[in-house]
Image (spheres, rainbow, N blue to C red):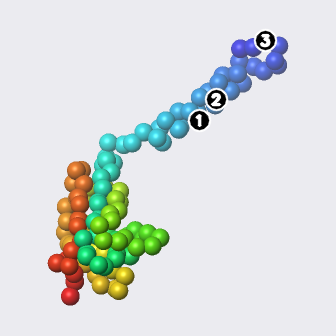
Amino acid sequence: MPEGRGISRVEWGMMKALSIFPAALLLACATPTENEPEPTYLTCVNGLRGYNIVEVNWRKTIDWDSDWYTYSRYGKLEPGESVKIELEPDNYNLRCIGEMGAKYARYNVEITADGYTWEVTLDDKEE
């Protein structure tokens, strides 16, 4: 405790404790828990010759009634281009929308810790 500052030992102890608290709180919040899966990636490749993709959508298979999550680029995903989207490992329904409104989909796709690459082709087109 510094001499001649006019504070008691209790006040000095509280000041020391409070100066450590923010750092401890930051460490606790930044440490991942054991239950959080490591992120993985969905790589979506436009394999549509001559057609652009304007949206990539996904949702977990168990969330059938939920809204689709959407990755929208500024511009289009042209043939041969790809996009990498961070997800957690799980089963997903995947969908892409072409610039003319056509929908391409794959359902109940398992995306593992190793990731998953989907090359969208005309075979994936929904009728």
| Disc marking residue 75 | none
Say whether residue 76 is visible.
yes
- Alpha carbon distance from label 2 to label 3: 19 Å
Instruction: Identify which amino acid the numbered label 3 is placed on.
Output: Glu
Quarter of the image where the C terminus is located: bottom left
State the residue at coordinates (30%, 56%). 41
Give, as a three-letter code, the residue at label 2: Ser
Which is more N-terminal, label 3 or label 1?
Answer: 3
Q: Are marks 1 and 3 in contact (CB under 8 Å)?
A: no
Front disc: 2 or 3: 2
Q: Are marks 2 and 1 in contact (CB under 8 Å)?
A: yes
Q: Which mark is residue 19?
A: 2
Q: Which residue is mark 1?
A: 22
Helix, strand or loop at label 2? It is helix
Classify residue 115 by image quadrant.
Answer: bottom left
Q: Amino acid at mark 1?
A: Pro
Q: What element does badge 1 sit on?
A: helix
Residue wearing tag 3: 3
Q: Position of residue 98 (x, y in %)?
A: 33, 80
In which quadrant of the rendered view does residue 118 lie? bottom left
In the image shown, does 11 or 102 lie closer to the viewer? 102
Badge 1 crowding class, 10 Å Cα cut-off, few under 14, some 14 to 19, many 20 or more, is few
Q: Residue at x 34, y 77 (%)?
A: 52
**Residue, far left:** 123
Question: Which quadrant holds the N terminus?
Answer: top right
* Residue 66 visible in the displayed image: no
> Which residue shows up at 22% across the image and 50% down it?
114
